[in-house]
Amino acid sequence: MSAFRLSDRELDMRALGQELASPSAGACVSFEGWVRDRNEGKGVLQLAYQAYAPLALAEGERIMAEALAQFAIERAVCVHRTGELRIGDLAVWVGISAAHRDAAFAACRYVIDEIKRRVPIWKNEFYSDGASGWLHPDGSPVQS
Amino acid sequence: MARHYRLLYFASLRDRTGCDGETFSSTATQPRDLYAQVAQHHGITLAAERLRVAINGEFADWNHALQDGDEVVFLPPVSGG
C-alpha cells in the first residue's frame, strides 16, 4: 500500500498503526491532526477538505520517500481526510517507526510540516456566524 | 490559433468560477498568459504570485510551453493538515 493516501472515510488508527510494525523498530511516533472548534478567534462548526487527488498523492508520496531517505526510520505512513469533518474528527494521521526515538520524532515532524506546506489539499471552515472561507497557511481567508 | 485546455478548479477558485472544471479555448501558450485570461473571464482577483500551476498532474513553471489538450490547474495556497 502507498505510504501516503487520501481517505473520504473515518480513519482507523489501530489498523494504520499496525502498518508500522517492524522487528527492528524500537520506537513509534504518531501525529494526529484534529478538527478544532476555533480559528483566528472565530467559532468553527465543521470543515471540509478538498484535494487535487492525482497531484496530492504524487507529492505526498515524494514527501514520504524524502523522510525515508533523510531519517533512520523503518516505516512511514500518512493518511489525510477529504470531505466533510466535524469538531474532534481526525483530519490527518502520520505514523513513523524507527530503531530509535530521535529519528522517529524528527521524521514525523518533517512529514506533517511538508504535507501542510506542499500537498494540494484545501480546508474550508464553516463558522458559527454563518460565514465560511477557504484558508491558506497563514490562517487568513483566501479571496478569489 | 485557439487551443483547448482542460481546466480544473479547487477551493476559492471553484467557488468563484462556480464549476469544478471546464474546457477553455485560448490563444495562450504559457500558463501565465492563460491565467490572465481565465482570471479576467471569471473575475478572479487572486494574484498569480500567490498560486502554483500544475500541468497534467505535475507542478510546472509559469512559462512552461503548453500543448493543445493539456490539463491545467491553478492551485490556490494550500491549507491541508
Image (cartoon, helix red, strand yellow):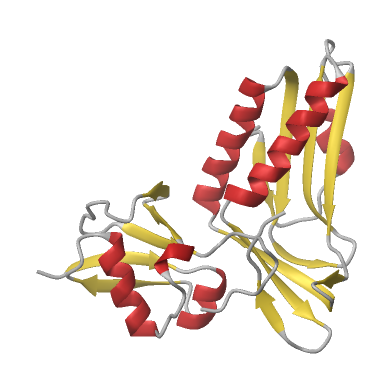
Residue B72 relative to residue B26: left or right: right
Q: Quadrant of residue B80?
A: bottom right
Q: Give the quarter of the figure containing the N terminus of chain B.
A: bottom left
Closest to the observer: A65 or A42? A42
Closest to the observer: A43 or A3? A43
Residue A19 appears in the rendering: no
Q: Is residue A118 above or below residue A28?
A: below
**Residue B58 image point, x, y percent:** 42, 47
**Residue A109 image point, x, y percent:** 76, 37
Residue B40 relative to residue A14: left or right: left
Residue visible at 64% across and 43% down in the picture: A114
Q: Give the quarter of the figure containing the C terminus of chain B.
A: bottom right
Q: Quadrant of residue A135?
A: bottom right
Residue at the extreme left:
B1
Closest to the observer: A24 or B63? B63
**Residue A22 image point, x, y percent:** 82, 16
Residue B35 appears in the rendering: yes
Residue visible at 67% across and 63% down in the picture: A138
Count of numbered circles on the image: 0
Residue visible at 86% across and 31% down in the picture: A29
Q: Quadrant of residue A120?
A: bottom right
**Residue B25 image point, x, y percent:** 23, 73
